Image: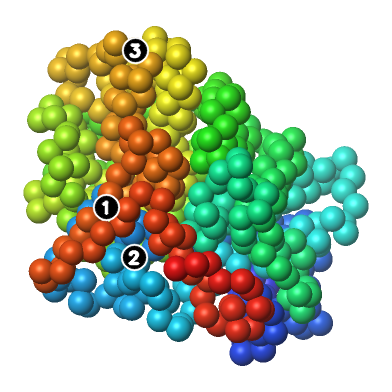
Amino acid sequence: MKNKLIYLFVAFITIIMLCQSCKKDWLDAKPNKTLIVPSTIQDYQALLDNSGKVNASQPGLVELASDNFYLNYSNWQTLQPQEKNSYIWAKDIFAGGPSNDWNSAYTRILNENVTLEGVNAISADASTKVAWNNVKGSALFYRSLDFYNLAQEFCKPYSQTTAQSDLGIPLRLQSDVNKTSVRATVQETYNQIINDLLAARGLLPVTPLYKTRPCKPAVYGLLARTYLTMGNYVQANLYADSCLQLYSDLLDFNSLSASSSRPIARFNAEVIFHTTILQYTGNNNGIVDPSLFSSYQANDLRRKIFFTAAGLFKGQYSGAATPFGGLATDEMYLIRAETQARAGNVVNAMSDLNTVLTKRFLTGSFIPLTASNADNALSKILTERQKELVFRGLRWTDLRRLNNDTRFAKTLIKTLNGTTYTLMPNDIRYVFPIPDNEILLSGYQQNPR
């Protein structure tokens, strides 16, 4: 049975790839359902369990565009055009070619829609209801994650005053690729993300069979991340807390080997949901920003757990060179800390921050941080947020959302071969262009650049 399901998935993906040349609308992937059609709950679960496809290749160019690391000129020259252009915030990032970030996400969305339509056509009885719920809830979760990550790259940052008119992403909610799609608004995009997650919440278990499968804590975690991105701190706090009430384990860095090339294990205790970011060469060759590196104290174990002596990042929560893009408890503690500080609850905010940091410092050396007021607490929490969540694909979103606060807005500066490149707060280049081939084929309105 296992071999049959594996064959089914391989055949299904092969059909998708063979049909890439037949694109008529939104995606270079068009399955021919007359050739092979998954028909059982187990079939659809098999589609979602292909972690090498479903739990991989989340958009990664935003990591190149952020400020966690720098590239020397010789390394930058070896990159493919979209990597080089993302690093310097060029006007035409994709240089007329397709976008790996865009295509990989919409390929998964197609698979998620096929799964949702298929499982909805199956009547579940008492013996199959749990499995049916898991398939539907998982597909909804995966789709919301893909929509969320696409929005961080191809949409303006969320603003309550303009979200109703700002252009969002195409919200593909059906598997029929011949149906014309348009760009939703930013508000509609985030509404869909949230609605998918709320629908998944009642379907998924608290504890997944594997960490590559979504679960109820993961739903709460992604809701917390989404609401934080939107600046809705009350809801972000609520869902971060809901997540931590169900799962709150932290990894003690004193138990790790700093001399290891991969000191943090895959599926470690902090991981709630595992997925990875597209592995671009530039992300592996980048040297940590000197000011960021120097902000780690000598007795802060992250200094050696996260970085080599040469300044290369090795602390992936994926347990490999591929960047981790999933959900983990340390992020939830930091979201709850930030939202507590924004609400003026300084004691609780610093307690959450110190709960994480005490696991990061050499045993017996950590002195709990204190804050004189809410603003001081917020500043310390945001500083530690960058240090803790470095190289997880989150920094770009943080830069975008914090640019609206003059206390935390930052001008990004990069230098290559004597040329200086600058990205000012709220620059229109904080929104990536829609790939040209998508504009030509679908007629989407282009982002200003």
The answer to whether residue 72 is left or right of residue 113 is left
Give the Cα separation between the discs numbered 1 and 2: 10 Å
The answer to whether residue 260 is left or right of residue 387 is left
Q: Residue 76 at what x, y percent from top left? A: 21, 71
Give the Cα separation between the discs numbered 3 and 1: 28 Å
Question: Does 121 sit above or below residue 290?
Answer: below
Question: Does 105 sit above or below residue 354?
Answer: below
Q: Give the residue drawn at x 77%, y 79%.
A: 178
Of the image marks 2 and 3, the number of the one nearer the N terminus: 2
Give the Cα separation between the discs numbered 2 and 3: 37 Å
Q: Residue 345 at what x, y percent from top left? A: 45, 12
Question: Does 237 sit above or below residue 328?
Answer: above
Q: Quick check: marks 1 and 2 in contact, CB under 8 Å?
A: yes
Q: Could you tell me which quadrant the N terminus lies in?
A: bottom right
On residue 89, the disc is: 2
Q: Quick check: marks 2 and 3 in contact, CB under 8 Å?
A: no
Question: Disc 1 marks which residue?
Answer: 412
Corner quadrant of residue 407: top left
Q: Can I make out residue 257 in this image?
A: no
Corner quadrant of residue 170: bottom right
Question: Disc 3 marks which residue?
Answer: 373
Q: Amino acid at mark 1?
A: Leu
Looking at the image, which is closer to me, 68 or 342?
Answer: 342
Q: Give the residue drawn at x 66%, y 54%.
A: 165
Looking at the image, which is closer to me, 374 or 143?
Answer: 374
Q: Secondary structure at mark 3?
A: loop
Of the image marks 3 and 1, the number of the one nearer the N terminus: 3
Q: Secondary structure at mark 2?
A: loop
Of the image marks 1 and 2, the number of the one nearer the N terminus: 2
